[in-house]
Image (cartoon, rainbow, N blue to C red):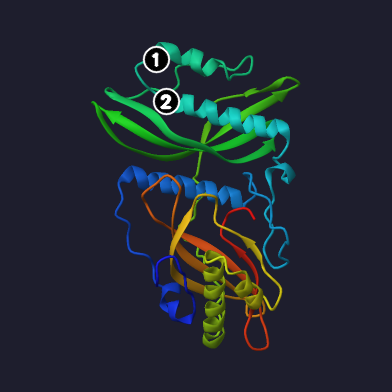
């Protein structure tokens, strides 16, 4: 591949990669916990619990819809305020350090009148705890309360040595009034919303169709990276596809892999592109989604989404 020019096609396809698990990561424990937490946050986005960006200019009829917070059951202004307040409160609630005399004041500013927490969190001798990350994972109304689920990643210090504290999930009960929201009671722990037994596999395509889809998808992404408008129009059947480019500042380096998938009448492809962000010396594999039409001879490209704004 010449510098600055990207190519894509069937030669780039590795069919076995669809079923081959990635090698085990060699990461520090804390980084692994961060990845887990943000994966859970991603799950919340898919379920419509957190905001997502606007849909493409030409919506796909075959793509599953994702509801934004504004249109979901937990999307009112009050629910959003409860979510933010519960997250801030739980961060303080799970922080246990040598400033115990300040703890009632730190927590009290979030509490509704009549709520008493007491000296409820007691560390073992020589142990302190901080919250590395905290993020909302869900909100629902039950029994007159707004129940906010919050995920938190903990760091514990034992005799001066920091160690992994794990990821926990709590439901914070909130109550609302005409002037705002407040914590209505003691948070209760809940099960983490992750199922290790869940599988996610693309719909398989016949070998010949998969190769054709991969070839066209690879050429389409290469045309985007090379800003080749005539090639895009040709691949779209003389109609230029909808294109969401890379986010501003991200610089693609090379196409790594192409993963075609079904259904056969409306195939898709995930084209992995190695790219560099604006302020980092680290390359990332970035999935570029390609949606296609099944044609009499070769599929045509409908949309290409690299995550940015057109």
Q: Is residue 99 above or below residue 42?
A: above
Which residue is rendered at x = 45% and y = 50% of the image?
277
Badge number at residue 100:
1
Query: Could you say which quadrant of the image residue 246 lies in?
Result: bottom right
Q: Is residue 2 left or right of residue 159?
A: right
Residue at the spot 68% in from the left edge and 43% down from the top edge:
69
Query: Residue 224: x, y in percent?
Result: 56, 66
- Residue count near mark 1 (Cα–Cα under 10 Å), binned few <14, some 14–19, many ≥20: few
Q: Residue 294: x, y in percent?
A: 66, 81
Q: Earlier in the sequence, mark 1 or mark 2?
A: 2
Residue 76 picture location, percent across and down: 73, 36
Is 31 situated left or right of 145 in this image? left
Q: Quadrant of residue 300?
A: bottom right
- Residue 230 vs 252, above or below: the answer is below
Residue at (59% x, 68% y) in the render: 290
Image-based side of 7 in relation to 22, left or right:
right
**Which residue reaches farthest top?**
101
Q: Residue 245 or 189: which is nearer the viewer?
A: 245
Is 71 in front, or is 93?
A: 71
Q: Gap between marks 1 and 2, in whole Å? A: 10 Å
111 and 56: which is toward the camera: 56
Q: Which residue is mark 2?
A: 95
Secondary structure beneath label 1: helix
Q: Is residue 195 visible?
A: yes
Q: Residue at x 63, y 63 (%)?
A: 243
Local crowd size for mark 2, using a 10 Å CA cut-off: few (<14), some (14–19), many (≥20): some
């Amino acid at each position: 591949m010449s510098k600055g020019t990207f190519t894509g096609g069937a030669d780039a396809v590795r069919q076995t990669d669809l079923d081959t698990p990635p090698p085990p990561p060699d990461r520090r424990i804390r980084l692994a916990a961060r990845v887990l937490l943000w994966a859970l946050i991603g799950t919340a986005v898919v379920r419509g619990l957190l905001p997502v960006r606007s849909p493409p200019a030409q919506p796909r009829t075959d793509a599953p819809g994702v509801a934004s917070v504004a249109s979901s059951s937990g999307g009112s202004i009050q629910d959003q305020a409860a979510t933010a307040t519960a997250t801030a409160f739980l961060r303080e609630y799970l922080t246990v350090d040598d400033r115990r005399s300040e703890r009632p004041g730190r927590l009290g500013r979030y509490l509704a009148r009549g709520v008493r927490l007491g000296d409820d969190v007691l560390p073992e001798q020589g142990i302190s705890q901080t919250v590395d990350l905290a993020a909302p994972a869900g909100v629902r109304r039950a029994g007159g309360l707004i129940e906010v689920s919050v995920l938190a990643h903990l760091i514990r210090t034992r005799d001066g040595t920091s160690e992994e504290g794990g990821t926990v999930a709590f439901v914070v009960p909130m109550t609302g009034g005409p002037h705002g929201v407040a914590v209505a009671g003691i948070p209760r722990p809940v099960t983490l919303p992750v199922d290790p037994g869940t599988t996610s596999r693309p719909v398989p395509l016949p070998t010949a169709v998969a190769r054709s889809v991969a070839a066209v998808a690879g050429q389409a992404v290469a045309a985007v990276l090379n800003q080749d408008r005539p090639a895009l129009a040709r691949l779209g059947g003389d109609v230029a596809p909808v294109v969401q480019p890379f986010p501003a500042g991200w610089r693609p380096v090379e196409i790594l892999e192409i993963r075609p998938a079904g259904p056969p009448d409306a195939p898709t492809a995930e084209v992995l592109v190695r790219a560099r962000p604006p302020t980092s010396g680290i390359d990332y594999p970035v999935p570029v989604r390609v949606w296609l039409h099944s044609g009499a001879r070769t599929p045509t490209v409908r949309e290409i989404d690299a995550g940015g704004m057109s």
